[in-house]
């Protein structure tokens, strides 16, 4: 799936029609202002909190069939084309649930989502659950991560850093450590935080290896990355 324009999908037509009826009916303008402020104005909000939103999502999806890859792409891309952030959250939740129905060809769609209205609230879930799931299913996609880590878009690079977040024993430690060093001089908070977070998470599985890495290379890492990496060690 190399084209990232939303493909035709009858299921997406049904889901989007229901979604854009059910979600706005639960909108709360006052709460929306609070959510916009909390998320630094990255996008407008309807003002639907997560528990309520997920309950509404179950209503939207009631009776719908399991999607194929085309349906997943259509639903996600069409949701991300809508302005309010809750629609983006719906897309991320949907992909988390159905990522195993997507092939390696879905990676360009995932990248499109990562680079659309980019902020940690969507990117981190896409990285750990969607991109990470795709790479786990097809290790050949790791070569794409080797390209993403050097991307000028910090959110693409952050995704490469975080895609192994849930891998535990299956983590490619050599690749993880190499990524951390390759972006260690990056000035942005979100990259430095991701370096520390990825190390801290792997440290739950391999604490000695993470301690040794930080001891050997801590001078190249930012204080934030070191602090995050060692927080639980």
Image (cartoon, grey):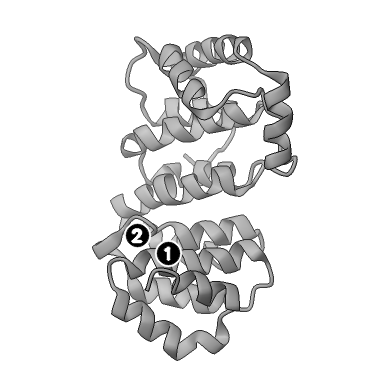
163 vs 56: above or below: below
Q: CA distance from mark 1 to mark 2?
A: 6 Å
For this rendering, which residue is in front, 207 or 159?
207
Quadrant housing the C terminus? bottom left
Compared to residue 135, the image places residue 205 above or below, namely below
Q: Is residue 202 or residue 6 the one in the foreground?
A: 202
Give the residue at mark 1.
Answer: 143
x, y percent for residue 9: 47, 19
Mark 2 residue crowding within 10 angstroms, few (<14) / some (14–19) / many (20+): few
Q: Badge 2 is on which residue?
A: 140
Callout 1 environment at 10 Å: few (<14), some (14 to 19), or many (20+)?
Answer: few
Q: Position of residue 176 (x, y in %)?
A: 41, 71
Asked whether disc 1 touches disc 2, contact meaning CB atoms under 8 Å apart, the reply is yes
User: Can residue 174 be seen?
Assistant: yes
Helix, strand or loop status at disc 2: helix
User: Can you tell which mark lies on residue 14?
Assistant: none
**In this rendering, is residue 187 above or below 162?**
below
Q: Is residue 83 visible?
A: no
Spot the residue most to the left: 169
- Which quadrant of the view contains residue 230? bottom left
Q: Nearer the viewer, residue 201 or 8?
A: 201
């Amino acid at each position: 799936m190399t084209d990232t324009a939303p493909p035709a999908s009858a299921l997406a037509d049904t889901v989007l029609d229901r979604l854009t009826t059910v979600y706005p009916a639960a909108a709360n303008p006052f709460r929306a202002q609070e959510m916009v402020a909390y998320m630094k104005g990255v996008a407008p909000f309807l003002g639907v909190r997560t528990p309520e939103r997920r309950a509404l999502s179950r209503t939207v999806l009631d009776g719908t069939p399991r999607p194929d890859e085309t349906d997943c792409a259509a639903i996600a891309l069409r949701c991300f084309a809508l302005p309010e952030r809750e629609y983006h959250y719906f897309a991320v939740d949907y992909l988390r649930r159905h990522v195993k129905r997507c092939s390696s060809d879905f990676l360009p769609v995932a990248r499109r989502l990562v680079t659309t209205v980019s902020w940690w609230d969507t990117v981190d879930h896409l990285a750990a659950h969607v991109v990470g799931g795709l790479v786990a299913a097809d290790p050949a996609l790791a070569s794409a991560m080797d390209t993403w880590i050097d991307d000028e878009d910090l959110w693409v690079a952050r995704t490469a850093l975080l895609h192994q977040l849930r891998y535990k024993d299956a983590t490619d430690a050599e690749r993880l450590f190499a990524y951390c060093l390759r972006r260690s001089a990056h000035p942005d908070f979100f990259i430095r935080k991701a370096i520390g977070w990825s190390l801290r998470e792997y440290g739950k599985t391999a604490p000695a290896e993470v301690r040794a890495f930080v001891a050997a290379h801590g001078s190249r890492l930012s204080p934030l990355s070191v602090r995050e990496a060692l927080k639980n060690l």
